[in-house]
Image: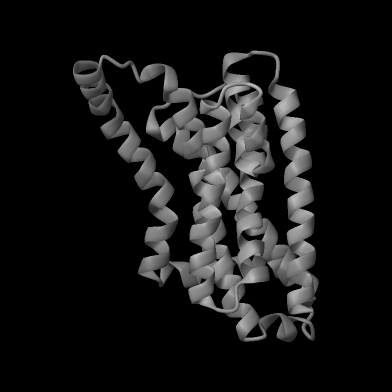
Amino acid sequence: MMRRVLALVRADLRNALRDPLLLVSLALPFILALAFRLGLPAAGELAARWLGADLRPHHPFLAAMLLLSSPLTLGTLAGFVMLDERDENVLGYFAVTPLAKSGSLLHRTLAPIALSFLFSLIVVPLAGLPQPRPSVLIPVALLAAVEATQMALFMGAFADNEVEGLALSKLAGGVMIGPLAGYLAPPPWHWAGGLLPPFWVTQAYLAGYHSNGRFWLYLGGGALVHALILGWLWRRFDRRVG
């Protein structure tokens, strides 16, 4: 099974290398990281000069938000692929091959997580933003990576075509309200952001970075929320293609 899934991964990579738009989309998290690296010092100087504000205490939060850029981007791309395959009944074709429908779905759900996890470990240091120790960064990046598959399944479960998929991907971007609420709202109102998965990623990142003792609370709560949402989306998508 895994050999056949890896063969499907290699085929997808070959297709990606032939598609300039897809290559640019894959590079987007790194472009954003470089924009932070080059632009944030200048923005900090302007804020200090004109507003008397110091942006440096907010850099860990910006790093946590940047961590989420990879899952959102890669999840959207995976969602469009799933829409194409659903419209062309590719899953029906795989159902009568040695790979089987389950193998194709395994690839389509695990590949975005793996790529997002790898990208997330790269973009934060590339941006020159503060990051916690590896024992914190790795589990937080893995939790964030799950949101790539959530995005893909959301598009595949609720969109009828690519136009609707694009609209839903924009709508799903509204989940970033969760981290903003968690960061800006005073306690206990900041917990309202916990209804949205990215809240738990940013809070776990900040708790681990500042070593305030709540890291495992946010990581465990986030794992539960992500698992519940992922299970619900999986069932909706499976019924849609079943």
Position of the C terminus, as image quadrant, is bottom right
Q: Position of residue 87 (x, y in %)?
A: 61, 84
Instruction: Using the image, determine if residue 208 lies above or below residue 155.
Output: above
Q: How many marks?
A: 0
Q: Quadrant of residue 105?
A: bottom right
Q: Quadrant of residue 221?
A: top right
Please name whichever residue, 223 or 184, is drawn nearer the observer in this view of the structure. Answer: 184
Q: Position of residue 101 (x, y in %)?
A: 77, 76
x 41%, y 72%: residue: 18
Q: Position of residue 159 (x, y in %)?
A: 60, 73
Q: In the displayed structure, does residue 53 sit left or right of residue 110?
A: left
Q: In the displayed structure, does residue 33 sit left or right of residue 214?
A: left
**Does residue 1 appear anywhere in the picture?**
no
Instruction: Using the image, determine if residue 7 lies above or below residue 50.
Output: below
Q: In the displayed structure, does residue 77 sit left or right of residue 7?
A: left
Q: Position of residue 23 (x, y in %)?
A: 40, 62
x 19%, y 17%: residue: 49
Please name whichever residue, 172 or 90, is drawn nearer the observer in this view of the structure. Answer: 172
Position of the N terminus, as image quadrant, is bottom right
x 35%, y 20%: residue: 55
